[in-house]
Amino acid sequence: AQKITQTQPGMFVQEKEAVTLDCTYDTSDQSYGLFWYKQPSSGEMIFLIYQGSYDEQNATEGRYSLNFQKARKSANLVISASQLGDSAMYFCAMREIDRGSTLGRLYFGRGTQLTVWP
Amino acid sequence: GAVVSQHPSWVICKSGTSVKIECRSLDFQATTMFWYRQFPKQSLMLMATSNEGSKATYEQGVEKDKFLINHASLTLSTLTVTSAHPEDSSFYICSAPHQSSYNEQFFGPGTRLTVL
C-alpha cells in the first residue's frame, strides 16, 4: 500500500488566489512527521513546511499552511495569495519516527504539478 | 539552513562507463545520507541508505553491484553507477538529515545523468 497519496496530478490557480494541494498518508506509527517540498524545473527540493504527529496546531510558514487532520490521515498544503513563482511540482512526504532512528527515510507521494496563471 | 552539495550537477557518459556522484554535507556531519532517483515527471524513489563506516542498505530491486555506495566520512557519500546504460539515465538526489533538527532533511541540488 502506498504510504503517501497525492490524488491531484495537476492543479491550476490564478495569481493571488489560494490553492489547496491534497495529501493523505498511511502509517501505523504513533510518531511521524509530514513534510511538503517544492521542486521547480531546476530539480532542487525546497523544504516548505513540517508537521509533527503530536503537534496540536496546524503548521504555518508564511504563505504556506498545513491543514492537518489526524483522524482522516490527511495533511493538505494550503498556499495563500499564489504567485507566478509558485508554479512547480509539490511533493508530500512522511517520515515514520517510531521505527528505530529518528533520522529515517522519507516516503514521497507522486507529486502535484501546480500552475499559477496571471 | 544546512547545506548539502552534489557534484557533478550533470553528466553525460557513454554506455558501459562508470560515473561517480558525490554528496557532501558542507556545514554539518551526516552519519546517514539517502540516495534517491527520480525519472521525469515521477516521484523520488529511495535507492539506498548510506551509513558512515558501514555498508549501505539498499531498497528492494536496487542492484547493489551496479550502484556502489561509499560513505567514507561524516561529510561525504559517493554513488557510483557502474557500467551505465541508457536506462540508468535519471536525476539522482541525495539528502542528509541534520542530527540536531528532527524537522528537516536537507537535499542536494541533484545530478542529472544521461547515458548515451
Image (cartoon, rainbow, N blue to C red):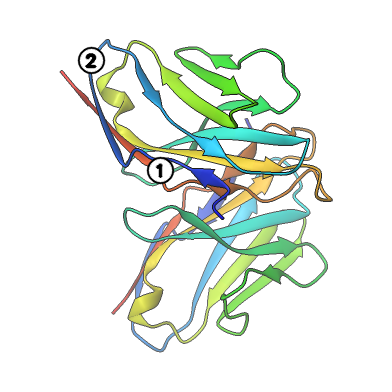
Between A85 and A51, the residue placed more toward the observer is: A51
Residue at the location (72% across, 40% down)? B98
**Residue A24: percent from left, percent from top:** 52, 36
Q: Amino acid at mark 2?
A: Glu
Q: CA distance from mark 2 to mark 1?
A: 21 Å
Q: Which mark is residue B99?
A: none
Q: Are marks 2 and 1 in contact (CB under 8 Å)?
A: no
Q: What residue did someone put label 1 on?
A: A111
Instruction: Indicate whether B35 appears above or below B68.
Output: above
Mark 2 vs mark 1, foreground winner is: 1
Identified at 71% across, 28% down, the residue is A53
- Pinpoint residue A93: horizontal percent, then vertical percent: 56, 41
Q: Which callout, 2 or 1, points at the residue further toward the start of the chain? A: 2
Q: Which chain does tag 2 point to?
A: A
Q: Left or right of B89: which side holds B96?
A: right
Q: Nearer the viewer, residue B83 or A54?
A: A54
Q: Amino acid at mark 1?
A: Gly
Residue under circle 2? A15
For disc 1, the chain is: A
Q: Position of residue A75 (x, y in %)?
A: 54, 28
SS type, badge 2: loop
